[in-house]
Image (cartoon, rainbow, N blue to C red):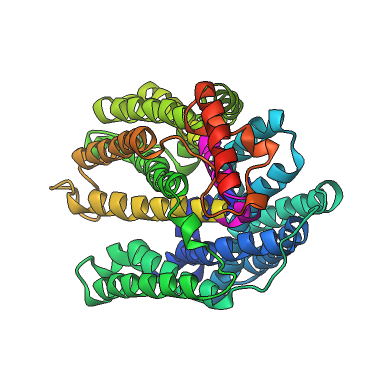
Amino acid sequence: MIVSMMQTLVVPILSIIQSDLGTSTANVSWVTTATLLSAAVFTPLLGRFGDMHGKKPTLIGVLLLMIAGSVLAATTTSLLWLIVGRVLQGAATAIFPLALSVLREEMPPAKLHGAMAMVSGTLAVGSGFALVAAGLLTRGADPDYHRVFWLAVALAAVALVGVLVRVPASRSTTGGRTDWLGAVTLAALLVLLLLPISQGHEWGWGSVRTLGLFVAAVVMAAVWVFVERSVRGPMVDMRMFVHRPVLFTNLAGLFLGFAMFSQFIGVAYLVQMPKELTGYGFGASVLRASVEYLLPTTVVSLLAAQLGGILVGRIGARFTLVVGAVFGVAGFAWLTLAHGSSASIILAGLLIGVAVSFGYAAMPALIVASVPHHQTGIANGLNSISRSVGSAIASAVITSLLASRTIAHLPAGVPALPAESQFTLSFAIAGVAFVMIVAVALVGLTRGATPAYAAAGESASPAEAMTGPAAGGVAELAGDRAEEKAAAATA
């Protein structure tokens, strides 16, 4: 919950922060961009660190960083120090892959799918809770955004106590030296990629700065691959990175992150449009938009998470991903064709919530079934990054689309408002993202076997063998196990 809260906590209060600190829209946007960038850097580094040196101490360190950042954000009146606090809060994203690694170690095979689905489902709950809490804490004539960050401090403190008391220490660690060169080059690649994506609307998509950073990202990608193929004990094993199930699961994560954030941004903006001026929308406040239109999606996501875990065990993660994506296509088709009533938006959101939950339930199972035990943290960390990149792309695309065509002849003094057709186009594009997830699952995610690059001693444990249907169902389990034995014998 804390992971997703850090992503959306400030979205409803950006205008309050801008007003209180007397800064520009471009400057205050760094309050969200800073967390996105730091999360991209911290997540793979700390995920790998947890694999090497233990999940529990790494989780404790992550939560301490987040508490420090939240206290700083809650006490400062400087934009610079607020951004520094948000950078520290970005470390929270590493909690997700670390949590899945703990589950893989501690849960019995029969309960592993359900546990991962439940933990994944809380991502959607955290987003909704953050939106509602931020709206409630900043109500009134004199809103104070600092209260929102004190809430983050309190929840992180509770989580820290829970980890200290209830999370067991890792029974085994890989040890080894941290690949600092690989970490630095990966961090540079992610910053160079995400910075122009998140700021391109402000800078201009054709500006020298935006295009230059995209070119630099391509160059840095080549440098990172070269480094990871050259060093001993790389942070990211390139063979794991391009292993077919891992590669296509990350691609599915990219599309899922895009679709999920498109619904969040599109609906939040749509319902706040003043109907008397635009001819559409409901003139909702930020709080009403969060509680009435977005919260139902997050609630159904938590309820559907358990069903997603059951489906992963029954029909396999691959087909669970397909079923979820079909729900997503239906939800966005509904939004595209009929977003003129509150009932339509809420019911379509429920379908999308189910789709997101099923996707979150399926992807960790696909990853866990496809990588050796000692690479669980880094593999799930990279999957988290793929979703973050998808969310960043969605933010940039939807924002640009809404700004590209506005309503003419608005009264003097009224800011530019998007034409309704831009919302329709945004929802249609998000629906296509779910169509792509169906294609990825059916074509790209064929039956997975033990990774060919894993040594015999690192092949799937009995817990992972339970995830054999992750690629296709119970009928394929025997074939998967035969391939595992053949791979081990060959090694």
Depicted 420 relative to depicted 386: above or below: above
Q: Is 175 left or right of 169, judged from the image as shown?
A: left
> In the picture, which quadrant includes the N terminus?
top right
Q: Is 136 left or right of 352, judged from the image as shown?
A: right
Quarter residue 435 falls in: top left
| Residue 187 visible here | no
Residue closest to the eye, 122 or 171: 171
x%, y% of residue 376? Answer: 61, 51
Count the labels in the image: 0
Depicted 289 relative to depicted 454: above or below: above
- Residue lying at the far front in this picture: please name it: 490
User: Quick check: is 335 in the magenta stretch?
Assistant: no
User: Quick check: is 374 in the magenta stretch?
Assistant: yes
x%, y% of residue 444? Answer: 36, 40
Residue closest to the eye, 294 or 87: 87
Depicted 362 relative to depicted 351: above or below: below
Q: Residue at x 59, y 39 (%)?
A: 485
- Residue lying at the far right in this picture: please name it: 165
Q: Residue at x 75, y 34 (%)?
A: 108
Quarter residue 342 falls in: top left
Q: Is 70 left or right of 128, judged from the image as shown?
A: right
Magenta span: 360-378
x%, y% of residue 131? Answer: 54, 44
| Residue 254 visible here | yes
Prevalent SS, magenta region: helix
Residue closest to the eye, 132 or 254: 254
x%, y% of residue 428? Answer: 25, 36
